[in-house]
Amino acid sequence: MTTLQDCRAMDAQDPLRPLRAHFSLPDGVIYLDGNSLGVAPKAAAARVAEVVEQEWTQGLIRSWNDAGWVELPQRLGDQLAPLIGAGPGEVVCTDTTSINLYKVLSAALNLAREDSPTRQRIVSADAPGADAPARSKGLSERSNVPTDLYIAEGLCRERGLELVLLEPEDITAALQDDVAVLMLTHVNYRTGAMHDMAAITAAAHARGIVCVWDLAHSAGAVPVDLHAAGADFAVGCGYKYLNGGPGAPAFVWVHPRHADRTDLPFMQPLSGWFGHAAPFAFTPDYQPAAGIRRFLCGTQPILSLSALQCGLDVFDAAQQLGGMAALRAKSLALTDLFIALVQERCAGHGLGLATPRAHAARGSQVCLTKDEGAYAIVQALIARGVIGDFRKGDGGRHQDILRFGFTPLYLGFEEVWHAVEHLRQVLESAEWQRPEFNQINAVT
């Protein structure tokens, strides 16, 4: 049985322990919700104040040039690119995940149109040819993050396509010649289950299907290699494991084989002025910028981008300590410990495990199920300073979830032990049954 002393020894031997000093963590809080909102980097408040007090207040409009505001989306994109297996000049940080998904899913549907010659550029040599049936379907996972499904539902309806939602084990068999686009989240937001991106992308491409990946629960938490996987498009958010702050700008990546196309100037539908080849030429017609810059749209949120840079700077520091490989190793050790301690110390209280045990099949969160009281248990833990969150089931296959995220940049092994001890006490005392813990908040 693992003891508190064992966990303290793990912390003492943790090579990533110095990274914790980069974050502002409240006293008395064990934060297990970095998969929903990351912790504030210590540098963020001073950096945002500097942008307000110096670059904006003193520099005024000159700061678009003098402080490099105009290039900030691309600079941060280049800083983020190594975390997701992208190259320089292939990523921009901009807009929200939902808006970026609208851009790339629209582009993917354009590429996948049966009358589009661009589709043949992404498929294998033995893929269907011109006699393939009409591509009338979009495909995704039933338990994909809902905002992605909402965007896809609207676009498919607009384009006259059927959006087909499946359980994960049924996706590969559904990759047929009538599917235009496959849209998946790499790590499932409810369960923490992780898809094999390379294998699924290869299977989709063999059928001429364009692949869109959401990395919101992957970037900064698990190693991702978009180029090695052969992906077509990817989006992700900046406020979870990247610690960019609430509502931080998201990011978008497009494979150069698509981003550099010159025959589709309106490949993405939001052709705003920051995506123009010469935005300050102020011409009345739209001429797209080269490469990924065409996936920008309107004027960029400089204060938010500046805060996001502070989160990305910590990953630069992590690179000196082993980078994503070291972060992934610690993430797996933290989640293994949590699962083992819950099984040892909380047995007999009806908790189930929704997250896969296999390392290759899970992200950086652990999701527990309970037939009754999942929401109230989370609220009771929050009242004790152990912050996780709750995700509601669908009344069928998917049960209510107690969701706990493990960010290796700042979380320690002793904190995991104490979190499980609090969970044990909440369950054994039936503390979660108190009325105040059963009042549903607007944000769960």
Image (spheres, helix red, strand yellow):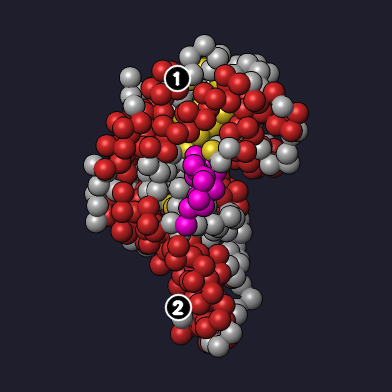
Q: Is residue 202 magenta?
A: no
Q: Quadrant of the C terminus?
A: top right
What is the number of the mark on residue 345? 1
- Secondary element type, mark 2: loop
Magenta segment, which residues? 24-38
Q: Is residue 243 above or below residue 172?
A: below
Overall secondary structure of the magenta section: loop
- Give the x, y percent position of residue 75: 40, 67
The residue sitting at 48% across, 65% down in the picture is 44
Q: Is residue 30 magenta?
A: yes
Q: Quadrant of residue 186?
A: top left
Q: Quadrant of residue 283?
A: bottom right
Q: Quadrant of residue 198?
A: top left
Q: Is 338 on the left or on the right of 270, as rendered?
A: left
- The answer to which of 10 and 319 lies nearer the viewer is 10
Q: Is residue 273 visible?
A: yes
Q: Is residue 137 visible?
A: no
The three-letter code of the residue at mark 1 reads Arg
Q: Is residue 281 above or below residue 389?
A: below
The three-letter code of the residue at mark 2 reads Gly
- The answer to which of 86 and 6 lies nearer the viewer is 6
The residue where tag 2 is placed is 68
